[in-house]
Image (cartoon, rainbow, N blue to C red):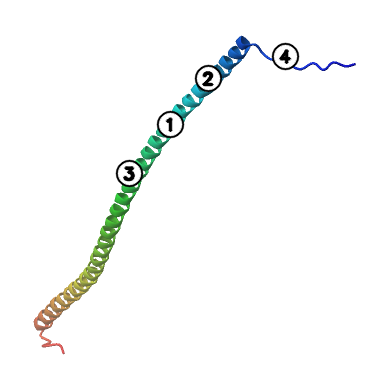
Amino acid sequence: VHVLHSPRLPTTTEQQQQEEEKEESLLGLYEKCCQATVDLKLYNHNANEKLLQERTRSANVQQALHRAQNALLKYNKRLAVAAQTLKGVQTHWTQQQGADQEIIAMASSLQQLHAAAAYQERLTQLTDKAGLGQLQ
């Protein structure tokens, strides 16, 4: 005949000790959960701070870039005006050079005319002196 042994029921003291151990274990888990929650909240807060700082820095960079683009546009406009002015000066200078060349050519022609007139005058004097009369 086999005798079936039923598990022994714990005593009240053992039950109480097991209950206390369970409570301590649950309390430890609860404390760990609370600490994890605090850590997560702190991490989330720090992440939000960093994100805000990064957004602010990004906005500042965008503003600086916008100001630089505006300055570049103004500089390009001034450069275009300066180029147009330079083109006008160059055109005027080229025209002035042409006028100078004309003046030089006129002066040369005038010099040749004076030389020819002086030569004519001298020839007239020589022919008059020689008694040959007016040369035609």
Establish if 61 lies above or below 82: above
Q: CA distance from mark 4 to mark 1?
A: 48 Å
Q: Which mark is residue 41?
A: 1
User: Is 8 placed left or right of 40 in the picture?
Assistant: right
Labels 1 and 3: the sequence-earlier one: 1
Three-letter code, disc 1:
Lys
Are circles 3 and 2 on residues that touch, CB within 8 Å?
no
The residue that disc 3 covers is 60
Q: Earlier in the sequence, mark 4 or mark 1?
A: 4
Pointer 4 residue: 8
- For the residue carrying disc 4, how many other residues have a C-alpha within 10 Å: few (<14), some (14-19), or many (20+)? few
In the rendered image, the vertical position of residue 111 relative to residue 63, given as above or below: below
Report the front residue among 134 and 85: 85
Q: Is residue 124 left or right of residue 72?
A: left
Name the secondary structure under disc 3. helix
The outermost residue toward the top is: 13
Residue on which disc 2 sits: 28
Q: Earlier in the sequence, mark 2 or mark 4?
A: 4
Q: Of discs 3 and 4, which sits in the foreground?
A: 4
